[in-house]
Image (cartoon, rainbow, N blue to C red):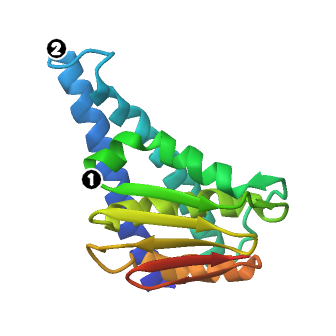
Amino acid sequence: MKKELIKIYEYFSHNFRTCTSTIVATLEALKMDLINVNDEEMNSVYESAYIMDILDISLNICIDHLIQKEVKNTDYELNVTNLIKKFLDEQKSFILLNEVETNVSGDDLVIYKNGYILKYLLQLIIFEAIKNSLDFLNIRVSDKEVHIQINNPKDNPPVIFNLLADIFHKYGFKFTFNDKEYTLEF
């Protein structure tokens, strides 16, 4: 378990530091009158805060899983397709910064079980897909899966994905991944 905790710490602390430094740098620029509140750069503050919320809840899910505490799991109706589109809309500046073109296609997919876990961990996976893509990210939704294809990946998937696969498995989902494709089956 110590190895897993170290991996979790490294992954989440890196992402928290990145988001925090983005917020601090933007607020410093605002304080120094280099930008104003209405400038597009201010979107990075909102987007970083949004990601930090996802990271915080995902970290709790991972730790609860590792210490074998039942993960808070609220069953509610979750439109997966709308969640994906909302996440991409909320991260427009981040997507532009990474020079990634995104495409979402397929059906509306609504699930009724384990929505809490799915909501946060799926957004974390998409966040990683955006970071790992050099140009084009295709997300296809069907009645049985979300399939994310990275046209030109920068790197291997993060090591945290192995833990996410275990968590998903425990709650009735199947998460598989390689360098170019991430698939979450329902």
Which residue appears at 27% of the width and 29% of the height?
Answer: 41
Which quadrant would the C terminus be assigned to in this image?
Answer: bottom right
Tell me the tag on residue 50.
none
In this view, 106 is above or below 34: below
Q: CA distance from mark 1 to mark 2?
A: 27 Å
Dot 1 amino acid type: Glu
Q: Nearer the viewer, mark 1 or mark 2?
A: 1
Which residue appears at 20% of the width and 19% of the height?
Answer: 35
In screen coordinates, is 90 left or right of 121? Answer: left
Locate residue 169: give its quadrant: bottom right
Label 2 packing within 10 angstroms: few (<14), some (14-19), many (20+): few
**Residue 148, image x, y percentages:** 51, 71
Which residue appears at 69% of the width and 57% of the height?
Answer: 80
Which residue appears at 51% of the width and 83% of the height?
Answer: 162
Front residue of 176 and 162: 176
Residue assigned mark 2: 33
**Residue 72, image x, y percentages:** 75, 60
Front residue of 59 and 142: 142
Q: Are marks 1 and 2 in contact (CB under 8 Å)?
A: no
In screen coordinates, is 151 left or right of 36? Answer: right
Front residue of 150 and 52: 150
Dot 2 amino acid type: Asp
- Tell me the element at label 2: loop
Locate residue 26: give its quadrant: top left
Q: How many marks?
A: 2
Residue assigned mark 1: 99
